[in-house]
Image: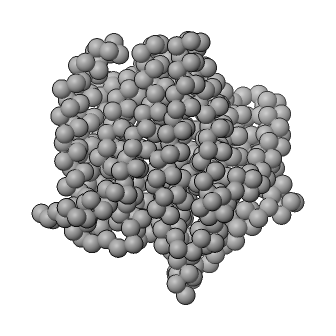
Amino acid sequence: MAESNLKSKTIRGLFFKLFEQGGSAIITLVVQIVMARILAPREFGMLAIMLVFVNVGNVLVQSGLNTAIVQSKDVSEKDYSTVFWMSLAVSVVLYVAVFFSAPAVAAFYRMPRVVWPLRALVLVLIVNAYNSIQEAIVARDLQFNKTFRATITAGAVSGVLGISSAFAGLGIWALVVQQIAQQVVKCITLAKQIPWRPRLEFDGGRAVVLFRFSWKLLVSGIMDQLYQSLSDLIIGRVFTSTDLGYVSQGKKYPQALGVMLDGAIQPVMLSAVSRVQEDVSNVKRLARRGLKTSTYLIVPSMTLFAILAPQLVRLLLGPKWLPSVPFLQMYCFVYALLPIHTTNLQVLNGMGRSDLFLKLEVIKKCLGLAIITFAAFVMRDIYAIVFGSVIVGIVSTFINASPNKRVIGYSYVEQVHDIVPAFAMSAASAVAVWFAASAMPNDVLGILVGIVVMLLVYVLLSWVFHVEEFDYVVRNLRAARSRRTAGK
C-alpha cells in the first residue's frame, strides 16, 4: 500500500512538475521573444554577465541546505527556521559585497551601464533565501501543484512588467525588472499556499548535521555555476557584449526546453529516491524510469529544435539574431544529454552520497576548464568555446554514470542501452523533417510541417518497434485522464 501510494504521489507530482515547467517555459519563451525584438543583443549580453553573480549567489545562499532538507528522513519546524536564518545571513553579506564591487565589475567588462542594474538585480538573493525553504517543503511532500501555480503566476506577471518596461524604453532595466518581479511574485504566491513562516529560533546542532551533508553540494554547486558561467565571463571579456548576447540567446532556448522536460522529472525522482533509499533495487528502477522517460521526451525535442533553428530564429526573433543559430544548434546537442547527467546525480543525492557528487564535479570542471581556456586564449575562437561545451558534455556522461554501477548496480552500458532507442528514432525522424521543411516555400510552413513530420515519424517508430517508454507515457496519460474524469 505504501509503495502504491508513493507511486501515485510520484506520478501526480511528475505531471504537475511537467505542467509547471511547460507553462513557465511557454510564458518565458513568449516574453523573451517579444523583448528580443525590442532590445539589442548587447543588452542581453549585459544581463548574462549580471546573472553570473546572481546564479553563483543563489548557490551560496542555499548552500545545498534545501537538498539536505529534502533528503533528510526527519525534519522539524526548527530545522526550517534554522536553515532560513543561515541562508538569509549569507544573502545579506553577498548583497553588500556585490553592491560595493559593482563599479569594479562594470569597469572590468567595459560595461559602465551595469552598475545600478547589477545592484538592483542581486536583491533577488534575499528573496530566494525564503523561497528555498518553500521549495524544499513542497518537494518533501511531493506537492508540486503549489509550485505550478506560483511559477505560472510569476511568469505571467513578470512578463507583463518586463515587456511594458521594454516598450517604455528602459533598456537593460526592463530585463532587470522582469527578473526581480518573477522571483518576488513566485515567493508571495507560494507563501499564500504554504503555512510555514520563519520563527525566531536556531538549532546549532541541527545546523551542523544538515551542513555536514550539504557542504559538498555547496562546493559542487559553486563549481558548476562558475563553470556554467565561465564561457559568459570569458566571452564578455575577450570578445564583445554583442557576441555574448548571441551566445546567451543561443543557449537560453535549448536550456529552457531541457529544464522544462528534464526538470519536471528529476526533482520528483529525488524525492522518491530519498523515500526508498534503503531499497537499492527500487532506486535502480526509479533511476531507469527517470532516465528513459526524460531521454524519450528531450532528445526528439532538441533534434527538432536544432533542425528548425534558422527558420525559428528568423521568424520569432528577427534577422538580427541569425548569428546565434550555430550556438543554438550546438547547445541543443549539449542539452539532449541532460537526462544522463541529472539522473545519475540525483540518485547520488537521494542516496546521501554527496561525497561522490563532489568528486565528479571536480573531475568534470577541471576537464571543462582546460578545454574552454584553450579555445578562448589559444584558438581565440568563439565557436570553439561553445563546441568545447559539446565535448565536455559527451565525456561527462561517462563520468557521471560511473559511480552508480557500484551504488545501485546501474552501469554505463545499461544506461546507453536504455537511451539508444530515443537517439536512433530521433536521427531517423530528423532526416524526414529536414527534407520536408526544406521543401516549404516559407518559414511558417517549414516550421509547422517540420513539427508534424517529427511527431508522426517519431510516434510511428515508437509504435512499430514497441518502445517501452512510449507505452509508459501513453498508459499514464490515460490513467491521468481517467482520474480526472472520475473526479468530476
Residue 178 in which image quadrant: top left
Residue 418 appears left or right of 227:
right
Q: Is residue 163 visible?
A: yes
Q: According to the image, what is the colour scheme of the structure?
A: one colour
Residue 268 appears left or right of 473:
left
281 over 340 or under it: above or below: below
Query: Residue most toward the left?
Result: 200
Going 61% across and 44% down the picture, which residue do you hit? 399
Residue 207 in which image quadrant: bottom left
Query: Residue most toward the right?
Result: 464
Residue 189 appears left or right of 232:
left
Going 48% across and 68% down the picture, which residue do you hit? 274
Q: Residue 308 placed where, x, y %?
A: 69, 34
Residue 49 appears left or right of 18:
left
Going 55% across and 38% down the picture, which residue do you hit? 364
Query: Residue most toward the bottom?
Result: 1
